[in-house]
Amino acid sequence: MRTRIFFLIFTLLSLAFSAPAQQAACTAADVPVSVIKANGDPVEGLVAADFIAQLKKQSLSIQSATYDSSPRRILLVLDETRELSAEAHKAAVEFATSIISSAQPEDLLALLTARGAEGAVKFGADRPALLHALNENHGEPARGKQLGVIDAVAEGITWFGQPQLGDSIVLIAMDLEGNHNTNFKNVAKLLEEHRIRLFGVALGHLELTNQTSSVQMTGRQGMGYVDPGMPMWGQTGDANFLPLTVNSGGYVVPEDTLSKKHEFKLTDIKKMELQKTASTMSGLIDKFYALRTSATPSAHPEPWTVSLNPGKLQGLPGAHVLYPHEVGPCQ
């Protein structure tokens, strides 16, 4: 009996003393950071000293900044809503096709559709299977209960399993409405927890105002927050697309196919524009700086900022840093 009690006490004490040791040994993992020029092209050739990272008002030590091009996992989420014109749907398929063709040969890709005919191709399928699925059910009426756009993103996140550096979702959608199973806050949290960057193409009206230009936000308020200095243009529209992408370390491309000023047509010129934009986005997903910093003192994810140092920024006017906006001690 005494032996059992001693063993129990010894076990509890071992756990108590080992917990702080494990916590102290925990360091922040690599974080994907992209640096783009004003035209969206990537900036290469940077080193750790070119970056500045801050948690609240404290500077974080940047241990390394490696330009990484390892194989990625990329999920395409395609909005099949019937509110989009046939030409807009063709544009969505064209963009998705270009992402597939631009991806590295070793990348694993998957496909999930929302608000339309069910389409699901999980990671591991070959490129021809993905391209076939993009066109197979395209334009067919939906059957059964439809996934909303954010519903589909949340479901797709579960496909990734254990997080890997550079995991990304490319969301091509009219807007982010019509969801039944989740909401923006939950999906933002899922993206943070699984360390997935969300990139997007907005096929409808998009609100691109700088949400922090007039009101200083601390922490997550409403849907979230966007990086100070993000561009201010566009018209009133979906207000959640921009922060959901930017806060995760990605960005959204405005491609308003619903404009009342002119009827959208997928011309040869527009097709070339979409192909170029998709190629640029694919390049940012595949190649980025794996930034390793010192561990954060908090046990929970904290808002942080990453920027270029003033000297480097002088030689790169208009350059912008894309990074996940929350970082934790154990990633």
Image: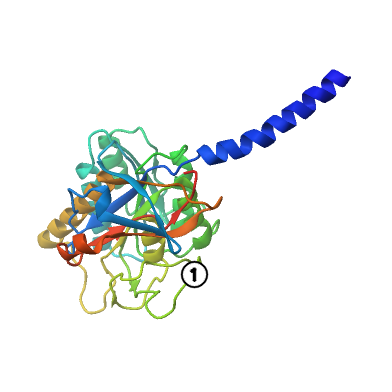
Instruction: Please provide percent x and percent y for residue 252.
Output: 31, 62
Instruction: Please provide percent x and percent y for residue 168.
Output: 36, 47
Of residues 143 and 318, the one drawn nearer to the viewer in this rendering: 318
* Left or right of 182 on screen, residue 288: left
- Residue type at mark 1? Thr
**Residue 222 seen by the camera:** yes
Element type where label 1 sits in the image: loop
Of residues 258 and 209, the one drawn nearer to the viewer in this rendering: 209
- Residue bearing the label numbered 1: 218
Compared with 17, 153 (above or below) is: below
Compared with 26, 278 (above or below) is: below
- How many marks are shown on the rendered structure? 1
* Left or right of 134 on screen, residue 181: right
Q: Quadrant of residue 14?
A: top right
Instruction: Please provide percent x and percent y for residue 296.
Output: 48, 51
The N terminus, quarter of image: top right
Q: How is the image coloured?
A: rainbow
- For image coordinates 16% across by 62% down, the residue present is 316
Near mark 1 (Cα within 10 A), the count class, few <14, some 14-19 or many ≥20, is few
Of residues 90 and 194, the one drawn nearer to the viewer in this rendering: 194
- For image coordinates 75% across by 27% down, the residue present is 10
Instruction: Please provide percent x and percent y for residue 151.
Output: 49, 54
